[in-house]
Amino acid sequence: MKVKDFHSMDSHAARESGRLSMMEDYSKMRDHEKEKREGLSWKEVFLLNKRAVLLWCRECPKLFISTALHSAIAALVPYLTLCFSAGLLDELAGARRREELIRWIMILLVADAGAYLLKALVFRWKEALSATMYYHGEARISRKILSMDFCAADDTATHELLSRIRQREHWSGWGIHRIYWHFERLTEELFRIIGAAALTVSLFCLPVPEEAGRLALLNSPLFILLLALVMAGVTLLSPYLSTLAEMCVMDHDESMKRGNRNYFFCLDLFREEKRALDMRIYRQDLFGLKRIRKTASVKDGVLRDVIRDARGRMGILFGLSAATSRLFMGAAYLFVCLKAWGGAFGVGSVTRYIGAITALSAGLSGVLKVIGEARVNSDTLKMTFEFLDIPNEMYQGSLTVEKRSDRKYEVEFRNVSFRYPHTQIWALKNISLKFRVGERLAVVGQNGSGKTTFIKLLCRLYDPTEGEILLNGIDIRKYNYREYLGIFSVVFQDFQLLAMSLGENVAAGSSRGYDRKRAEACIRMAGLSEWFAAREEGLDTILYKDLDEKGVKISGGEAQKIAIARSLYHDAPFIILDEPTAALDPVAEYEIYTKFNEIVGNRTAIYISHRLTSCRFCDEIVVFHEGSILQKGSHEELLSEEGGKYYELWSAQAQYYGKEQPSLDSPHKVIYS
Ligand code: ADP
């Protein structure tokens, strides 16, 4: 049976018993939404952003250095042009000396070209580094998921939290990546403010001569104060309005989430290769197209409210924000031109002062806008840190697992009962079982009887709710977890191979090279001798075409055998095979059965299946029913208990497979419906 991985959370089984958990999740989500509306305090906003910046600086320090450098250059370069062009314009409006004009032009050209060259070089450096951010972010999330207790990773609430973080990131660009853009803009704006302030000082200091009459009013400190206040007001208003507009976007979080899910649903539906046949035969395209139409519908699609708001409240706020900043420009032009007219400075300085004062305002607006955005973004940052801070609550012991060449590891389940977190149903009830060393044990039972849960507990993906599991007489919680896991090789039904070489797939986990001879032997032992002999590249054959067009496509059966070879290479004392022959054809299945003893060798094997014929060769068969062990014994013993569950299942399967049960004596006798 499947051990549900992080992405297969929506299985029917999980939904059924996870109902309580889902209700808790929804109420958590509602609390979260409420909290969001109430807003975070400025202190929380500061701490969240500080933590995010430090996290990025730790992970990619050079990116932040190159960005700060680029921001400084980008912000200061325009002033260079402004300063030198003022000299040129003054000369043009004044003495118009030829040599002076040429000198100013040369200075302007050399300074500009040099500055832009430097800017372009630093820009390339910064851009190349910023392209790695995505990988750093993904690696951070993967590290967290992999280091998380399995029960936390398997929890719907975790899944939902990550999905919301990703949705905000992909849809509207909020989240931890945004911190970098904020940092970039903030440093650029700060440098811009410094440069502009330095240039603007003389604008206010240079007085209009008294002879200018009424224009001398421009020298009045009261007038200057009034003007500064108006300009500051306009400077603040623009970012304030745009932050309000951004908050409107966040109000549509839920619709955007639904829109996003629909988008990926449609993407999967039409592009995924594995769906292509179903799509054609069952005309799922009609269903998919209808859904796309509905999603994209302006009138009643999931994005209806977002679209409506973009035309209304949100659009107006963004528009007003843009318009206000232009008002500032008008006031700046008026003030500078009047001062020049009054004779405070020459015409050449007009462009310089206009440029400087608008840059000062844009810089201040920019800083405030980033602060506003950082506030809006903090909600997503909070979610991100909630995810990164999910604690590992499983007890991690430190006992080392004794390395035994005789493989004498004995595992015992003692009165083990288990309930999945947030559920009331017992998935396992009072299980007591001892694996004898070297034994072949089959675990059978109907769907939902607890087989997979039993394996999850054995591999300590979950801890029992009651009772204990012992390894050589000691509670498994006391062992070092990594070492404990090392005694198991598992072939899950939904195993995953990688688009890498065959050898790397078989020897997974050996990052420092691998034993090629052993890998080849395992491949042959798993029944792939002929297939392997036909591979010219041998162990270097690349599987699948994802990363290499020379890669080979493999059938489900071949993949399953490679997975078996991988478990053999791992060479652990316990081998667990979860429906190992589900994807094999009858002949290949027969091959695996007859060679099973050879394959498993002196390991203790646990074989999970609901196809009873595949369990006949096991020493002991355990029949699970509704979380309990109903029967135990050899195939013959269990079959002799007429009226027992095993007999009932066997008889039921006999009907489907024909009068003659699949036999191990000859592959040709295997009759499948
Ligand atoms: P089997 O492998 O025999 O089909 P499982 O071990 O998968 O059975 O399931 C046993 C019981 O535990 C079922 O009632 C199932 O609904 C429940 N269950 C399985 N996985 C989860 C989960 N992640 N969360 C909640 N309940 C679960």
Image (tube, helix red, strand yellow):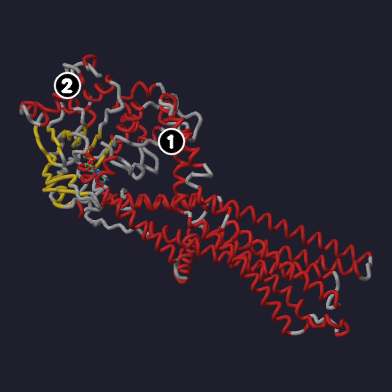
Q: Amino acid at mark 2?
A: Ala
- The residue lying at 35 percent from left, 30 percent from top is 559
> Would you name the residue on which mark 2 appears?
654
The answer to whether any part of residue 62 appears in the image is no
Q: Tag 1, which secondary structure?
A: loop
Residue 327, image x and y in percent? 70, 67
In this picture, is 176 found above or below 268?
below
Q: Is residue 444 above or below residue 156?
A: above
Q: Which mark is residue 500?
A: 1
- Determine the image quadrant of residue 230: bottom right
The answer to which of marks 2 and 1 sits earlier in the sequence is: 1
Numbered disc in front, either 2 or 1: 2
Instruction: Point out the residue furthest to the left here.
Output: 641
Looking at the rendered structure, the kind of residue marked 1 is: Met
Q: Position of residue 558 (x, y in %)?
A: 35, 27
- Residue 311 position, x and y percent, is 58, 53
Using residue 237 as the reference point, say whether residue 25 is left or right of it: left
Residue appearing at x 47%, y 33% in the figure: 270
Which sits in the foreground, 272 or 5?
Answer: 272
Between the C-alphas of marks 2 and 1, the distance is 41 Å
- The foreground one among 153 and 253 is 253
Dot 2 crowding, Cα within 10 Å, few <14, some 14–19, many 20+: some
Side of 488 where 510 appears, left or right: right
User: In the structure shown, which secondary structural element does the residue marked by tag 2 occupy?
Assistant: helix
Label 2 beta carbon within 8 A of ligand 1: no
Taking the image in four quarters, ligand 1 sits in the one at top left
Could you tell whether 632 is left or right of 555 in the image? left
